[in-house]
Image (cartoon, helix red, strand yellow):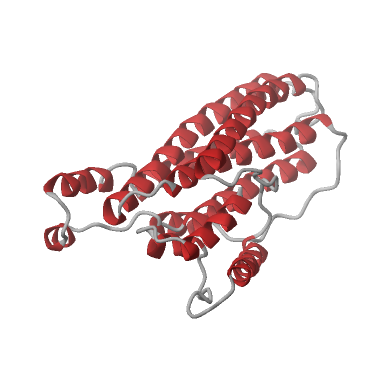
Amino acid sequence: MKKILCVLVWLTFSSSFLFAANFSKIVRSTEELSCCGDVPEDSIAEEAMTIDKKFLKKLGAVYRDTVECPESSTAGMSDWAYNRAKEQDSKSAYLSRNLLASQKGSTVLADSSGSNSVQLRQALLRENQVWKTLLTSLRTFDNIAIEISIIENGYGTIFMVISAGLFQDLSYIRMACLKEDVVTFTSPDKEILKADEGMSVDSLYYYMSLCRPYVTAEMLRESDLSPSSVSDLKRLNNSHTISTMKKRVEAWITARRNVSGLLNPSAKSQYDLHTNKVLHSLIYHYWGFGC
């Protein structure tokens, strides 16, 4: 999905969309893109890719959809992303069923007698339920950030692509995580994996906050927005706040820990690594969004 976003970076420098100033923050770094002067468009895209790679190196392991979008129009890219998300959500449902089936009689339990198999099944069901709640909240959060940007900067059809890309990104992250979870539950014991030492979950909340500009009453009074737009901003600003999102994320992390706490050391190390990869992927999601 990030390959779509790289196309959008190029669009922000080659179009007159009103939101270009905000969307150019798609690359979160202390470094700035060479967007001034007669800089070739391919050089801008290349520089964006370089900054992207540097951030990934610092971030840690992530789940990334590397399939390139074959479309070039905004409508085409949007439809492609939503259709791909639908396929990935369907795949996730299938993998979740496989995960529940695979734990029966498996050797991943810390208690080799299998007496905790019912408890593990309940923990897996709970994790899936909590993820669905988190996913709904994340998508609402993303939509609100886009709505705020539209109110402040005006509408451009490229927002269709941004919205679809964010939607599909979350679908891929879950599917990729479940794929690895299934492998962990169905494969023979492996070595204990070293814990990921990338960015912590606090970085997720930080980058999420950058997508939701703090709107004060004074800022609204001094703005040139219409009364209806001001009313919409107030409503959006109070919905799905960072503190609310933090509770949802922490609930999912707890659900994952409840599962991993029942697993043997090898399976636990792998399962925990998948959890961290999801968190890193969400950090990357919001760092790339950066509205």
Which quadrant: the C terminus?
Answer: bottom left
Decide which of 173, 269 is in the foreground and name it.
Answer: 173
Q: Vertical placement of 110 versus 48: above or below?
A: above
Decide which of 156, 111 is in the foreground and name it.
Answer: 156
In this picture, residue 202 sits left or right of residue 88:
left
Q: Quadrant of residue 59?
A: bottom right
Give the mark count. 0
Residue depicted at 51% across the width and 44% down the height: 74
Decide which of 237, 152 is in the foreground and name it.
Answer: 152
Query: Residue 19's x, y, as percent?
Result: 37, 58
Residue depicted at 57% across the width and 28% down the height: 128
Q: Is residue 116 visible?
A: no
Q: Residue furthest bottom?
A: 37
Residue depicted at 70% across the width and 45% down the height: 67
In this picture, residue 149 sits left or right of residue 135:
left
Q: Vertical placement of 81 versus 146: above or below?
A: above
Query: Residue 140's x, y, as percent?
Result: 40, 38
Query: Residue 233's x, y, as percent?
Result: 23, 48
Residue depicted at 27% across the width and 44% down the height: 236
Q: Is residue 90 visible?
A: yes
Query: Residue 69's x, y, as percent?
Result: 64, 44
